[in-house]
Image (tube, helix red, strand yellow):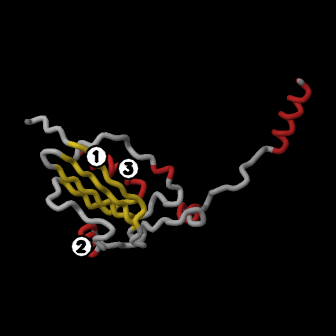
Amino acid sequence: MNTMLLTFISLSSFLSFQPLASNQGLLDSEIFSFQVEYPDNQSKTFASEDEFYAKLDKKLYTEYENAAYSMRKKIFFHEVPDAELIFRTKTNLPGEKWNISSFPFIHPNRQVYFLASFQQNEKEEFHKYTIIDAETNTVLLGGNHYHLYDNPYK
């Protein structure tokens, strides 16, 4: 056993194991460009949030009429969890911060529009959001939430 261990140690130091591939000298965009469907586009310019929303096909997304709170943000994809958390906090919707690592096909520096809207009445609350790619105008993520509202001021 000792002989085998010593042999392994001497062989490993002799071969000096190196990683098979090195990312040294490559930009993030070059590393990710062949791995993701939506590569880095941070150097491109896109319309402001309000201009984008004005031209947006309302079949894709529309804010609630008489919304109590709405958000429109042009951000990088890696900022989506923070924007979503701000929306949840301001509209008192419980939940945990998102983990975007489950979306490896979207580069973290991809520009997206985060659109969210909240409506409330005496009995109900409605939340909805969508994340749209700034370059292709493709909906990447979206969802909504509904629940009864128990007004504490009754």
Q: Residue furthest bottom?
A: 55
> From the viewer's perspective, is residue 47 above or below residue 130?
below
Q: Are marks 2 and 1 in contact (CB under 8 Å)?
A: no
Q: Which residue is mark 1?
A: 88
Left or right of 115? Residue 10 is right
Q: Amino acid at mark 2?
A: Ala
The numbered dot on residue 81 is 3
> From the viewer's perspective, is residue 149 above or below residue 62?
above
- Label whose residue precedes the other's in the sequence (3 or 1): 3
**Residue 76 image position (x, y, % from top left):** 39, 59
Q: Amino acid at mark 3?
A: Pro
| Helix, strand or loop for disc 2 | helix
Assign the C terminus to one quadrant of the image.
Answer: top left
Left or right of 146? Residue 97 is right
Q: Nearer the viewer, residue 113 or 60?
A: 60
- Label whose residue precedes the other's in the sequence (2 or 3): 2
Q: Which residue is mark 2?
A: 54
**Residue 120 image position (x, y, % from top left):** 17, 49
At horizontal 40% and vertical 59% (from top left) the residue drawn is 141
At horizontal 35% and vertical 72% (from top left) the residue drawn is 46
Q: Are marks 2 and 3 in contact (CB under 8 Å)?
A: no
Assign the N terminus to one quadrant of the image.
Answer: top right
Mark 3 or mark 1: which is in front? 1
At horizontal 26% and vertical 44% (from top left) the residue drawn is 147
**Residue 84 image position (x, y, % from top left):** 33, 50
Between the residue at mark 2 and the residue at mark 1, the CA separation in whole angstroms equals: 24 Å
Q: Nearer the viewer, residue 12 or 77?
A: 77
**Residue 45 image position (x, y, % from top left):** 36, 73
- Label whose residue precedes the other's in the sequence (2 or 1): 2
Q: Amino acid at mark 1?
A: Arg
Count of numbered marks: 3
Number of other residues with Cα within 10 Å of mark 3, as a class: few under 14, some 14 to 19, many 20 or more: some
